[in-house]
Image (cartoon, rainbow, N blue to C red):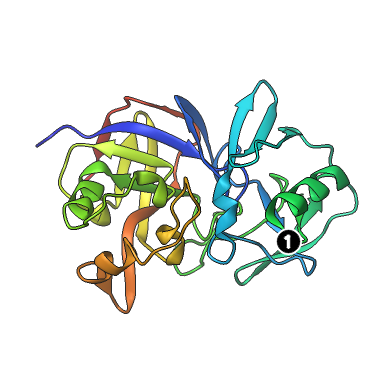
Amino acid sequence: MQELRLTEIWIYPIKSLGGIRLKQAQVLEKGLALDRRWMLVDNQGKFLTQRVYPQMALLKLSIHDDKVTIIHTKNKSSHTISLNPQKSESTFPVVIWDDTVQAFEVSPTSTTWFTNMLGIECKLVFFPEGNERAVDRKYSTTENVSLADGYPFLIIGQASLDDLNNKLETQVPMNRFRPNFVFSGGGAFEEDHWKSFSIGNNKFLGVKPCSRCVLITVDQQTAQKSDEPLRTLSTYRKFNNKIYFGQNLLAVDHTFVQEGDLITLHP
């Protein structure tokens, strides 16, 4: 059997903005440390994503010391926030899908900058680590998740993307699918069937294949939408009226993972 190895680690500190590639990351219950702990919401407290506002793709992130810098790739305007925001007593409810959770506004300065950059009134909010948001109880009884769509982690095999790109006229990069983990080795879509495995010494459980939406049709460099790769995926990855790509995960252990870690499947 071909060796399975972790080749990429990604976090997305602010939901639906650009990702940051890491050499190693800390595994927490809610997801990788700093992954999707911030989110943009409208005046009603409802979450914003590239599904409706593809211009969010133009905001790219980097981490230096204890700060995150966000830069607009077209106009080059930038803004910096702390990785350790001052906790506010004035939390308020925000809505992500069917969940309502408590978060707090990062700062009026951040609110103004994001409103100007995106051309829509919005606030940047922070979701404290101790605040609860349950994963789907059909698949777990105790775990919590960050502000990710539904599950703490997402893994995709490079062979799965290669299989898709062989069917596309114009190839797409992995960043369309916003994984936390990318691995080499194995066959296309074999991660669909992983139930228990370890990355290095950290054990994970496969929960369910990840259903995909129009977000994967947004070019992460230009913010332009098309009908691909969703249209092609629908021709061979559609089951029960949903289109799947990647596998959602829960963590059993909460240690560290790093690029190059061996992936071991458990019986």
Rendered residue at 16%/52% (across/down)? 166
Task: State whether residue 191 is above or below residue 229.
Answer: above
Of 215 and 256, nearer the camera is 215
Rendered residue at 27%/74% (across/down)? 239
Q: Quadrant of residue 236?
A: bottom left
Q: Amino acid at mark 1?
A: Ile
In the rendered structure, the answer to whether residue 226 lies left or right of residue 183 reads right
Q: How many marks?
A: 1
What residue did someone put label 1 on? Answer: 120
Position of residue 170 measured from the top left corner of the image (x, y, whole percent): 26, 53
**Screen quadrant of the N terminus:** top left
Rendered residue at 25%/49% (across/down)? 161
Position of residue 169 measured from the top left corner of the image (x, y, whole percent): 21, 56
Task: State whether residue 57 is above or below residue 225.
Answer: above
Q: Residue furthest front?
A: 75
Of 153 and 75, nearer the camera is 75
- Secondary structure of the residue carrying tag 1 is loop
In the rendered structure, the answer to whether residue 148 lies left or right of residue 162 reads right
Of 203 and 40, nearer the camera is 40
Is residue 124 something one can see in this rendering? no
In the rendered structure, the answer to whether residue 30 lies left or right of residue 94 reads left
Of 223 and 90, nearer the camera is 223
Rendered residue at 37%/26% (across/down)? 259
